[in-house]
Image: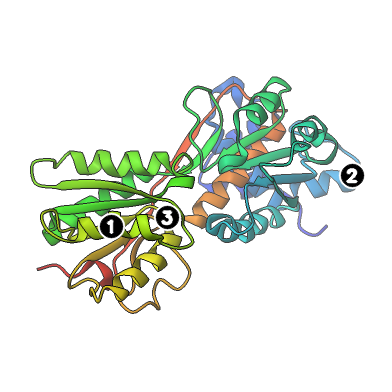
Amino acid sequence: MGKKFKNKDLAAKLGVSGTLVSLVLNSKADQHGIKKETQEKVLMLARQMGYFDLLAEKNETAPSEQSPGILGMIVPSLSDLFVTGITPLIQKAFTGIGVGFSVITRDPDDQRFDRMIVSFRKFFSGLILVGEAADDHTVRTLRSADYPFIVLEKNIKNLRLNTVCTDTAAGSRLIVDHIRKLGYKNVVIVTVHSQANSHRQEVDDITSALSQYENSLSVRVVELESGNAINGSDFDQLEKLLRPPFRAEIIISVQAKMVYQLMRMLQNKKLRVPQDVAIVSMEEGPGFDLIISPITCLRKPLEAIANKVANMVWSEVKNGGKGKFKRQVNLPPELIVRKSCGTLK
């Protein structure tokens, strides 16, 4: 095994007391009011330092049993930009502590999925539900069975659940503050009709942030029929807002994939970005930095999200899905300012 594990070494690395480490490793942390986040950090580092491997070599079982096996992540689509970005980071976080990880795609039209929910325990010690994969039926079924799971990138307000989300309200404030500094007053928010429900929180957050300056900003919301191409009716909606009397000065795209279609439409109309109309995206898309007039966007803190998810789901497994405390973690995004929004005057 190598060097013997010592509580004081772990305590020194985390900057906590040896007594605290001992309480966590002996499953007495809750009795002494030690925060869940602190417990997670102790257990994760203990795993990395070989504490549980050493016990296994001695055929001993830790009071805080750590055998999460394989953890699963159910995603709505493998083509989702967030999913493709976060998956390797979560896998890295689990690999670092010797935990298996598997991704399952949920087809919303596959009626067999509902029958699979109850059998997940046979294959996975715990689950991560991403976005629309955390539908009401799935969440309630897992919750009623005390199944260890957390929800990623979806706020479910009517239930007490462990969730990790990007703080879109904080991101919206970053965008609006930047817009006001640039002096824009006529704002168009563009979203895709078919995804309006799944992105309702983002639309609500950006409109709420803009409404705080309603005396100085004019706002219109446009729901386009498709995210793949701007059709005739979509074109008419946008064109009306790009000319007087409204004459949009900046377009905020809720979905990253709409940006490419917007840029093409504006190019066909011989409108320049940002000279004639500026563009900002609430999501980061592939190649945004390479487009002519690189796109200003919000960047999700993927690595921080992945680490927090790994800690929380492992903690849920340790508690057998019966953890007393449920946490709603919101991590703020970063505003990446590029040429598409213009420059400060």
Tag 3: residue type?
A: Gln
Of the residues tagged 3 and 1, which is closer to the observer? 1
Q: Please provide percent x and percent y for residue 311.
A: 61, 43
Q: Please provide percent x and percent y for residue 302.
A: 50, 56
Which residue is rendered at x = 14% and y = 42% of the image? 213
Tag 2: residue type?
A: Lys
Nearer-the-camera pick, 248 or 36: 248
Q: Would residue 259 appear left or right of 236 to someone viewing this image?
A: right
Above or below, 223 relative to 239: above
Which residue is rendered at x = 83% and y = 57% of the image? 1
Q: Do we see residue 40 in this rendering?
A: no
Tag 1: residue type?
A: Leu
Instruction: Give how far apart the Cα atoms at labels 2 and 3 are.
Output: 53 Å
The residue beneath circle 2 is 58
Earlier residue among tags 3 and 1 = 1
The residue beneath circle 3 is 255
In which quadrant of the rendered view does residue 78 lie? bottom right
Instruction: Give how far apart the Cα atoms at labels 2 and 1 are.
Output: 69 Å
The residue beneath circle 1 is 238
Q: Would residue 186 appear left or right of 8 to someone viewing this image?
A: left
- Toward the front, the furthest residue is 232
Q: For label 2, count other residues whose C-alpha is less than 10 Å away and answer few (under 14), some (14-19) or many (20+).
A: few
Q: Please provide percent x and percent y for residue 137.
A: 65, 27
Nearer-the-camera pick, 264 or 78: 264
Q: For label 1, count other residues whose C-alpha is less than 10 Å away and answer few (under 14), some (14-19) or many (20+).
A: many
